[in-house]
Image (cartoon, helix red, strand yellow):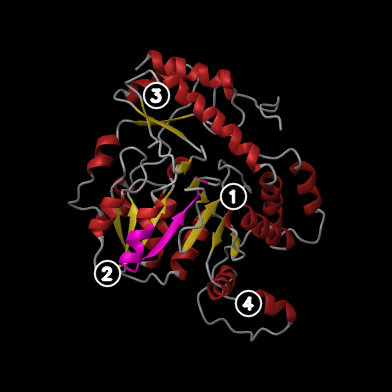
Amino acid sequence: MKFNDKTFLKEKNKILMFYPYISSKSVKNVGKTIKSRWIGQGPKVELLEKKFSNKFLNNKYALATGSGTDALHLSYILSKIKKDDEVIVPIFTCTATNIPLLYIGAKIVFADIDPNSMNICTKSVEKLITKKTKAVVCVHYGGLPCDMSELKRISKKHNLILIEDVAQAIGAKYKNKNVGTFGNFSTFSFQAIKHITTGDGGLLTVKNKDDYIKAKRIRWFGIDRDKKYKGTWSNDIFEIGYKYQMTDISATLGLDSLSEINDIIKYRRKLYFRYLQNFSKNSKIKVIDDFNNNKFHAAWLITIAIENKDYLQKKLNSKNIEANQVHFRNDKYTIFKKFAKNKKFKNMDYLEDKYLVLPLHHKLKIRDIDHICNIVNKNT
């Protein structure tokens, strides 16, 4: 597969942080879908669910959604998380991980990060468990798996539900097993700049048939669509439902890219390891990676930590290279502040002003990475 085609136009000659991956097949195939009977939720959605499950989950109970956030909210509902239940979550993540808990009225309990991976710190998690703790949510930051053996151990010991947010880590593996297969529930994102995109979208995987049937129902207003189309529905809604389904137009984009996912991940990892090679002799740069041999990095982000982060970011921008932090500690947002009052997060505090995300996507070439690294190395 050839990347870096001529359709990549650098905005004002900038090297961009992100660029959506759209298969060359999709222009034709999306057109076919638009001309078909099904443009909303239809057979393409079911096909994406099946193919994604076969590829990464070996689990037939998967539901495509309108976003990764939709999938997370559904997972929290299926976990029977209720008002005032405590849920342990990473302090450092996209707000989408934690905002659906506000819908429910759950008590968010922030855990500190591991300083090497910026994933949830398992030691912090265990210290936070109380009688009110219902679930633990982990996020595989940037494509690097969390310490799933330890999280599984903790969850089993304390009878907690374990939920994996795999939004950034499609294709990542822990001990040769795909992430998204360890938790009671797992969610994925197909948002615009993820490994593959459906424009916006997500996917939820569950472990049993009863949860699957319920998830399908509340994904669509609380209506059993299958029974409705067969004329056997009771014409009653007995639980709150949502409009969280994916469309066939979106699913067509996803199916085309999914067929190329191995090449996508392989190329992203090639760029990632080129960064590592270029930074290997610079003691002032710490790459956010625990370099654990049990982990297969899916290379969604390359994040570094340096003392002069602000200066370096401005220097890169002056050279038309985008760099930013992408995600921020959630307790700094007004909506979450009450959950972190009078609490300290030593590792997050240390890294808060030091981490920086550099460009990584399929439109970049090795020479682009070398150019970026040359500027970084000269200015650290």
Bin the neighbour count of mark 1 within 10 Å (Cα to Cα): few under 14, some 14-19, many 20 and up: many
- Dot placed on the residue nearer the N-terminal end, 4 or 1: 1
Q: Is residue 215 magenta?
A: no
Residue furthest to the top? 378
Q: Amino acid at mark 1?
A: Asp
How far is the residue under mark 3 from the one under mark 2? 42 Å
Q: Residue at x 55, y 47 (%)?
A: 170
How far is the residue under mark 4 from the one under mark 1? 24 Å
Query: Where 312 sits versus 130, above or below?
Result: above
Q: Position of residue 110 (x, y in %)?
A: 29, 53
Which element carries disc 1, helix, strand or loop?
loop
Which element carries disc 2, helix, strand or loop?
loop
Q: Amino acid at mark 2?
A: Lys
Q: Is residue 162 magenta?
A: yes
Which element carries disc 3, helix, strand or loop?
helix
How far is the residue under mark 2 from the one under mark 1? 34 Å
- Dot placed on the residue nearer the N-terminal end, 2 or 4: 2
Bin the neighbour count of mark 4 within 10 Å (Cα to Cα): few under 14, some 14-19, many 20 and up: many
How far is the residue under mark 1 from the one under mark 3? 29 Å
Image: magenta residue range: 152-169
Residue 313 numbered mark, or none: 3
How far is the residue under mark 4 from the one under mark 3? 51 Å
Q: Nearer the viewer, mark 3 or mark 2?
A: 2
CB contact under 8 Å: marks 3 and 2: no
Identify the residue position indicated by label 1 in the image. 200
Identify the residue position indicated by label 2 in the image. 132
Foreground of the two, 199 or 356: 356
Q: Amino acid at mark 3?
A: Gln
Q: Position of residue 94 (x, y in %)?
A: 42, 47
